[in-house]
C-alpha cells in the first residue's frame, strides 16, 4: 500500500484507504453525524479525515416507532431503523452542500436485496463529490436486509460483488459483530472485491421497563454502542487486521485520542467515531489533535508507523 508523503506536513497523519487518501485517520461514523451540516457550527469539518453520512436507502424510510433510544451504563441502545430521506432527496438536497466540503465524503448505503444495493450504487455513481461508499450489511434493528447479509459470508460476498461491479469509487464494507466468526466475514467481502472493511457495528441488546413490564424500545431489541463495546471491537479489529490484506477501519466506543490510538496499534488504518458525537460534538476534532500530539511527543515521522505496531 502506497502512502503519500509530504515532508512539509508535520506531524504527518495521512493514511490511505485503498486509493482514497485521508489527511488524518479520523472519520465520523454513519448515523451519528447526520449529513454533516448539522455539526458545521460546532466542528471544523475540514479538519476531519472524512465524513461518513447517515445511511441512504433506495427509497425513503420512516424508521421504527418511538421509543428508539435508551441510555445504558457506558453506552446507548438505539433502534432508529435506518430512517433516511432516500437516494433521490439525498442527491438533490444533501449533496449540493456535501460536495463543497474540503474533506472526503463517504456515503453509507443499505438495501433489502442485492438488487437494491446495486441500484443505489448505480444512482450514486453518477454523482459528483462522493469519495467512497460504505456498504451497510450489519444493522441489527431492521426486519429485512442488512442483518441477513451481515451474518452470512456468501450473502455478504454477493452484495459486495454487486456493488463493486457498478461502483465508481472505493467500496468499504461495514461488518457486524453479531457473528460467530468475524474473520470469515471479513475474508468473504475481501474476496468479493471490497477495498476496505469497517468494524464493528452495534451489538444486539435490549432494555426492560420494570414499571410497565415491557421492553423500553418499541422495536424490543436495538444496537448497543459506546464505550461498553470497545473491548469487543478492539479484539475483532485485531483479529481481522491480521487476516486480510485490505485496510481495516476501527469503530466501537472511541471517545478519546487514546482510544483511537489503541485501534491503530491493533491494526486499524483509520477509525470512526460514533456515539461520542452525541456527548461531545467536537470529539472528532479533538481526537485528531490528540493523535497529532502523540505522534509529535513520540518523535514519529508519521501516524503510519503505529498501524499494527502492537507487540504481543
Image (spheres, rainbow, N blue to C red):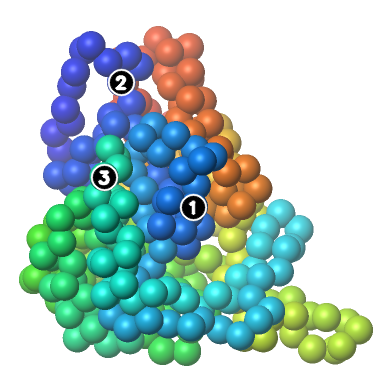
Badge 1 density bin: few <14, some 14–19, many ≥20, Cα 10 Å: few
Counting from the top left corner in percent of width and height, residue 155 is at 26, 82
Q: Residue 12 carries which label?
A: 2
Which quadrant of the figure has residue 254?
Answer: top right
| Disc 2: CA contacts within 10 A as few (<14), some (14-19) or many (>=20) | many
In the picture of the structure, the residue carrying the numbered disc 1 is: 38
Q: Which mark is residue 100?
A: 3
Q: Residues within 10 Å of mark 3 (few under 14, many from 20)?
A: few
Q: Which of marks 3 and 1 is nearer the N terminus?
A: 1
Q: Residue 71 placed where, x, y %?
A: 73, 63
The residue shown at (71%, 69%) is 70
Instruction: Say whether residue 221 is left or right of residue 115.
Output: right
Number of the label disc, if any, that sits on residue 299: none
Question: Which of 53 and 301 lies nearest the eye of the viewer?
Answer: 53
Q: Dot 2 lies on which element? A: loop
Q: Determine whether label 2 and label 3 are within 8 Å by CB.
A: no
Q: Is mark 3 on a helix, strand or loop?
A: loop
In the picture, measured across the screen, residue 302 lies left or right of residue 272, that is left
At 87% from the left and 88% from the top, the residue drawn is: 212
Q: In this view, does 3 lie above or below 180?
A: above
The residue nearer to you, when weighing 250 against 99, is 99
- In three-dimensional space, the C-alpha distance between marks 2 and 1, rounded to whole angstroms, equals 29 Å
**Residue 45 in which image quadrant:** top left
Using the numbered discs, state the Cα–Cα distance from disc 3 to disc 1 in whole angstroms.
15 Å
Which residue is painted at 17% across and 31% down in the image? 3
CA distance for labels 2 and 3: 24 Å
Query: Residue 55 at x, y = what percent?
Result: 38, 68
Compared with residue 233, is residue 86 higher up or lower down, i.e. above or below?
Answer: below
The residue that appears at 47% across and 89% down in the rendered structure is: 143
Amino acid at each position: 500500500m502506497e502512502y503519500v508523503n509530504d515532508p512539509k506536513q508535520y506531524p504527518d497523519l495521512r493514511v490511505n484507504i485503498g486509493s482514497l487518501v485521508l489527511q488524518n485517520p479520523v472519520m465520523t461514523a454513519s448515523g451519528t453525524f447526520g449529513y454533516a451540516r448539522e455539526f458545521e457550527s460546532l466542528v471544523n469539518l475540514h479538519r476531519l479525515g472524512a465524513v461518513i453520512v447517515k445511511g441512504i436507502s433506495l427509497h425513503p424510510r420512516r424508521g421504527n416507532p418511538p421509543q428508539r433510544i435508551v441510555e445504558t451504563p457506558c453506552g446507548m441502545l438505539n433502534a432508529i431503523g435506518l430512517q433516511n430521506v432516500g437516494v433521490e432527496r439525498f442527491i438533490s438536497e444533501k449533496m449540493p452542500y456535501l460536495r463543497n466540503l474540503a474533506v472526503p465524503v463517504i456515503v453509507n448505503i443499505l438495501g433489502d436485496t442485492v438488487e437494491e444495493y446495486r441500484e443505489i450504487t448505480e444512482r450514486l455513481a453518477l454523482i459528483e463529490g462522493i469519495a467512497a461508499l460504505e456498504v451497510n450489511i450489519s444493522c441489527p434493528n431492521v426486519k429485512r436486509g442488512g442483518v441477513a447479509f451481515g451474518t452470512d459470508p456468501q450473502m455478504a460476498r454477493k452484495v459486495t460483488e454487486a456493488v463493486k461491479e457498478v461502483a465508481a469509487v472505493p467500496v468499504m464494507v461495514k461488518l457486524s459483530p453479531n457473528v460467530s466468526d468475524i474473520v470469515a466475514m471479513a475474508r468473504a467481502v475481501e474476496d468479493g472485491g471490497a477495498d476496505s472493511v469497517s468494524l464493528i457495528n452495534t451489538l444486539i441488546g435490549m432494555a426492560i421497563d420494570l414499571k410497565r413490564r415491557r421492553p423500553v424500545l418499541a422495536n424490543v431489541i436495538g444496537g448497543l454502542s459506546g464505550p461498553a463495546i470497545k473491548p469487543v471491537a478492539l479484539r475483532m479489529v485485531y483479529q481481522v487486521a491480521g487476516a486480510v490484506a485490505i485496510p481495516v477501519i476501527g469503530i466501537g466506543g472511541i471517545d478519546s485520542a487514546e482510544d483511537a490510538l489503541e485501534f491503530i496499534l491493533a491494526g486499524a488504518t483509520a477509525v470512526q467515531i460514533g456515539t461520542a458525537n452525541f456527548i461531545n460534538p467536537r470529539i472528532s476534532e479533538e481526537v485528531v489533535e490528540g493523535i497529532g500530539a502523540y505522534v509529535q511527543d513520540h518523535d514519529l515521522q508519521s501516524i503510519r508507523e503505529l498501524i499494527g505496531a502492537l507487540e504481543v
